Image: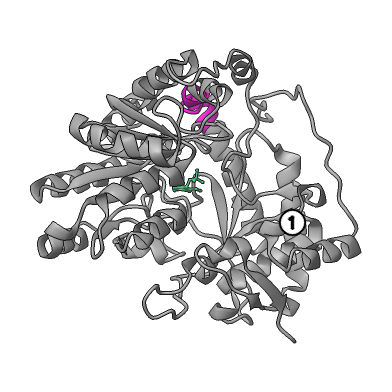
């Protein structure tokens, strides 16, 4: 029997597919950088799951009551209450989005020469550590970079490696960060066992253990489905246990919290909260809004609770699996197991004619747009950027294209369409060309650099 969709549409936006020649024009206008495309020129936008989802009617209703009072707003109190009850930390600092949380934390805790180990850090996480003179260290288990490994928790931290670093450089480490799920290695989850043991190691060496909780609910769902002993546990009790191992958490509220903006810093320690809070006010916004409008805080208070519903998580993860399996049927190599928020295509393998420093993932993003108006994003050597000291291009461990599924936005037909575009592209993939810089920017070069196709 067919699966009943979880939602019905109440407000719609028309999609149109512009012609191939218009798409080429549009891509040229964007200097072959999909970040620069206009939304009206995109048929299906899989650039990100961040802030791009649909709001529920309950979120919209809450927005109507958004309280824009500068201090003491009802919407802030609703958000603080919701964050405490869903995530379980007693102290909350609002910020405008995830990178705002990173900036505030790193400005205070990271010094020149600091090291921040963890599993694979997200790009803004890395850049925020680096601009303060620190060094992010990737301690993800080695299987995470083996596309053929079907390990269920490929986001795990390599504990012996972490311990070696903590032992040798303990005094230089302001905190260890575990990103759940781990975006950079394919939306792969971290097991409860690994969270517990990472936390215990940090405690042993007197170092704070933080979580990046942008996609914490998907991580909790994977623990329930894949980790022994958790099948009968509620998502709530799994989240409570996950958070109990951490001293704090940095949250982009635009992913699993189902909001279009916002972020939070969550802390257990009052003293650290009191140190960080004024910097939140300095860099993000007042201590009771953090650059979120009252409307945004009101809808986030609701979204936090909707995003952890098991029925929703089951639907969401099944959607990602559906697209992933469709691509596999066509023979497109993807990262396995299929992750939580996106399908990651192994562009390096699919387009072997493109060298790593001509960015296979980015080239595939351009080709996909040209073929069918689908937008996606590279996760590879372009994103890796240059080494801040040597200025050499850093080679990523693999060259991926991420197809991120926005929350509650698209249905099966959209995913079927995306798979069909891949099918068409598959026949001519040997003719896809690499890209080179016309203008390279710094930092976060992938957002604003300009490219051209290399001559064939
Ligand atoms: C794991 C992770 N952490 C942090 C961020 C940064 O969050 P934001 O985009 O809200 O600044 C992102 C964004 O995609 C992310 O995926």
Name the side, left or right, on which 456 lies relative to 14: left
- The residue tagged with tag 1: helix, strand or loop? loop
Quarter of the picture holding the N terminus: top right
Quarter of the picture holding the C terminus: bottom right
Q: Quadrant of residue 228?
A: top left
Does label 1 point to a residue whose CB lies under 8 Å from ligand 1?
A: no
Is residue 218 rendered magenta in the image? no
Q: Nearer the viewer, residue 147 or 81?
A: 81
Q: How many marks?
A: 1
Q: Nearer the viewer, residue 20 or 59?
A: 59
Residue at (53% x, 20% y) in the render: 298
Q: Position of residue 224 (x, y in %)?
A: 38, 34
Q: Which residues are magenta?
A: 303-313
Say above or below: 393 vs 218: below
Say above or below: 128 vs 269: below
Q: Magenta-highlighted stretch: main secondary structure?
A: helix
Name the side, left or right, on which 409 lies relative to 83: right
Name the side, left or right, on which 59 lies relative to 273: right
Determine the residue located farthest toward the bottom in the rendered image. Answer: 456
Name the side, left or right, on which 174 lies relative to 266: left
Residue at (77% x, 58% y) in the render: 421
Q: Nearer the viewer, residue 244 or 431?
A: 244
Q: Which residue is mark 1?
A: 37
- Badge 1 crowding class, 10 Å Cα cut-off, few under 14, some 14 to 19, many 20 or more, is some
Q: Nearer the viewer, residue 79 or 409?
A: 79
Q: Position of residue 117 (x, y in %)?
A: 27, 58
Q: Can residue 234 be seen in this snapshot?
A: no
Q: Quadrant of residue 65?
A: top right
Is residue 311 rendered magenta in the image? yes
């Amino acid at each position: 029997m067919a699966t009943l969709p979880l939602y019905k549409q109440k407000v719609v936006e028309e999609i149109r597919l512009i012609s191939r020649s218009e798409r080429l024009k549009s891509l040229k206008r964007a200097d072959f950088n999909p970040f620069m495309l206009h939304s009206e020129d995109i048929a299906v936008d899989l650039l990100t799951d961040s802030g791009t989802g649909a709001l529920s009617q309950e979120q919209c209703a809450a927005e109507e009551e958004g309280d824009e009072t500068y201090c003491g707003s009802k919407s802030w109190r609703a958000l603080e209450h919701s964050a405490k009850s869903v995530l379980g930390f007693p102290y909350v600092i609002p910020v405008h989005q995830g990178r705002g949380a990173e900036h505030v934390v790193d400005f205070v805790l990271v010094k020149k020469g600091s090291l921040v180990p963890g599993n694979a850090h997200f790009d803004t996480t890395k850049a925020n550590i680096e601009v303060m003179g620190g060094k992010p260290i990737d301690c993800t288990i080695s299987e995470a970079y083996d596309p053929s490994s079907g390990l269920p928790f490929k986001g795990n931290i390599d504990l012996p490696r972490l311990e070696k670093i903590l032992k040798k450089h303990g005094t230089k480490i302001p905190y260890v960060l575990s990103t759940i799920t781990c975006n950079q290695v394919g939306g792969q989850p971290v097991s409860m066992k690994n969270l517990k043991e990472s936390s215990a190691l940090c405690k042993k060496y007197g170092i704070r253990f933080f979580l990046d909780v942008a996609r914490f609910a998907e991580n909790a769902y994977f623990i329930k489905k894949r980790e022994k002993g958790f099948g009968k546990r509620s998502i709530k009790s799994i989240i409570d246990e996950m958070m109990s191992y951490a001293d704090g958490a940095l949250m982009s509220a635009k992913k699993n919290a189902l909001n279009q903006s916002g972020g939070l810093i969550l802390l257990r320690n009052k003293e650290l909260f009191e140190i960080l809070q004024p910097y939140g006010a300095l860099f993000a916004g007042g201590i009771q809004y953090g650059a979120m409008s009252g409307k945004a805080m009101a809808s986030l208070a609701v979204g936090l609770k909707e995003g952890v519903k098991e029925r929703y998580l089951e639907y969401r993860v099944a959607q990602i699996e559906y697209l992933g399996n469709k691509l596999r049927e066509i023979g497109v190599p993807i990262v396995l197991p299929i992750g939580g928020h996106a399908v990651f295509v192994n562009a390096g393998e699919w387009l072997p004619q493109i060298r790593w420093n001509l960015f296979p993932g980015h080239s595939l993003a351009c080709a996909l747009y040209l073929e069918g108006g689908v937008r996606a994003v590279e996760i590879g050597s372009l994103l890796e950027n240059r080494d801040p000291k040597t200025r050499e291009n850093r080679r990523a461990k693999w060259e991926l294209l991420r197809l991120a599924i926005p929350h509650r936005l698209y249905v099966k037909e959209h995913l079927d369409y995306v798979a069909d575009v891949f099918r068409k592209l598959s026949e001519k993939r040997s003719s896809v060309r690499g890209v080179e810089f016309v203008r390279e920017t710094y930092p976060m070069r992938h957002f604003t650099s300009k490219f051209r196709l290399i001559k064939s």
